[in-house]
Amino acid sequence: MRHHLTELVLFSTYAELRAERARSYLGFVWWLAEPAMMMAAFWIVFDVILDTGGRDYLPFLLIGLVVWQWMKSCITHAGHAIWTNLGLIRQVRVPVLIFPFVQMFADTVKFGCVFVLLLAILWLLGFPPNRAYAALPLLLLSIFVCAAGAGLVVAALMPLVPDLRFVIEQVLTVVMFLSGVAFALRNVPDWLMTANPVLVLLDAVRGVLMYGTWPDWPALARATAASFAAGAIGVGLVLRFAPRYPKMAV
Amino acid sequence: MAALVELDRVGVAFRAQRRLGSERYWALEDVSVSLERGHRLGVVGRNGAGKSTLLRLVAGILEPDRGTVRRAPVTCQLLSLTLGFVGHLSGRDNAILSGLLLGLSRRQIEARIEAIREFSELGDFFEQPIASYSSGMVMRLGFSVAIQVEPDVLLIDEVLAVGDAHFQEKSGRALHERLREGCTVVIVSHEESKLADLCDRLLWIEHGRSVMEGPFDEVIAAYHRELHVGEGG
């Protein structure tokens, strides 16, 4: 059956957001309240109680957590998307790639709201907009592609090996600690700087938002290339396994 | 006449369990059938014969593990009720979402949304989340959306009427009207009287293999003979 894919993806994204709003009493408020509570928890533990933060820790933490939460949500939600829609996939011929993308677009809409709030808070904290903001669209696109690449690889494999869902949360926790999300990494080995695109991307966003510095373009190009490669592998895996999904037990 | 869909000795295998090294079983082993424009083909066979798998194969949901499927550039749609329904969304939003999944464009659905609302007899509930509906109301909405889809080949798996007595008659009538419009259709049903009413040809499959295909009366007679022999033996 021929589908009107753009309309299907856009309306499914809207439906996902509407349904999520309806699942709680406070609805949209949680889009901001949930990340705010997490930021407060990290700030209280690492800055107020342990005093490990240092100068400019609060903006450092806010940027790290907002961007990381977006990536993590995209990876986990996209990763589960095909598996949780196996029932639908068994009933109708539909391009399975839409399911992870709907989840990632919904997460990106929520991130957009939080990110605007983040920019306002940074301004209040003494970090006003600067010329390097011009690099933000490219940076955010690179981050999305990075998350999408990882999310699509997980999405492709999850229906075949559902046990992955027990592993993915732990792997993401390790990546978070190795990416300087909540606290600055000191003495980062060169190989980690090269091998972990999340570290490079977060570093670039903080540089733009806090200090008005342009990204390290060669490092950003390497991270973006790695992200696109992961995305291509993810799309390739989903298309490769697509004929097997309707035959999977729900 | 050129076939719209032609299956040549197709087989479809599933894995019984999601475990390393689990055996595959063949839901369809060796089925051949040719569907031409305007054919109204019924499918009979005992439970587990592979009838529903055959429909999903024709719909393009499943790909064969052996044999070949040749399909002209036509749309084949399984009549699926409540496809993609989300409990927290209103009847209207679910109608749009389900219609998009069934292959309609947003514009086509918007043009038919009042017809869907009217046919479903949901009244003001149409704007309420379907989580507040009874199961009968959900099925009414599902049927009202599904009947709007106009594929080249309509595939029906036992869904011949839904809801209470009044709506069963109404939905059954709507479906019959659709079929009388001359669309190509494949119907799986255990209700032989319905098949006799709706189909001009019949495919009989057993244990995933096509036993006989041809004019309805000839095949149903042979099928009954086999059933009686089986019961007698």
Image (cartoon, coloured by chain):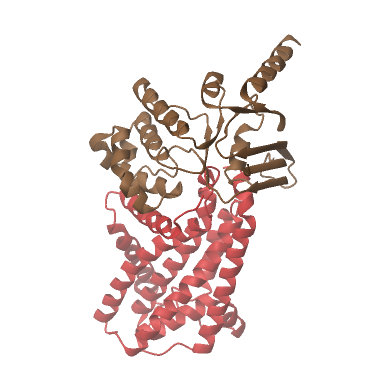
Chain colours: A red, B brown
- Residue at the limit of the structure toward the front, as seen here: B1
Q: Position of residue A87 (x, y in %)?
A: 52, 43
Which quarter of the picture shows residue A118?
bottom left
> How many labels sit on residues?
0
Q: As drawn, is B41 to the left or to the right of B117?
A: right
In-front residue for pair B135/B193? B193
In-front residue for pair A181/A48? A181
Q: Position of residue B74 (x, y in %)?
A: 55, 48
- Is residue B128 visible in the rendered structure shown here? no
Task: Please tell me whether residue A109 is drawn above or below residue A162 in the rendered image.
Answer: below
Which quarter of the picture shows residue A225?
bottom right
Residue at 55%, 21% in the rendered image = B196
Q: As drawn, is B45 to the left or to the right of B94?
A: right
Q: Position of residue B38 (x, y in %)?
A: 55, 36
Q: Position of residue B157 (x, y in %)?
A: 53, 32
Task: Please tell me whether residue A60 is drawn above or below residue B70 in the rendered image.
Answer: below
Residue at 39%, 81% in the rendered image = A136
In-front residue for pair B150/B63? B150
Which image quarter is the C terminus of chain B in? top right
Which quarter of the picture shows residue A149?
bottom right
Residue at 59%, 40% in the rendered image = B56
- Is residue A89 visible in the rendered structure shown here? yes
Task: Please tell me whether residue B203 is drawn above or below residue B145 in the rendered image.
Answer: above
Which image quarter is the N terminus of chain B in? top right
Residue at 73%, 15% in the rendered image = B230
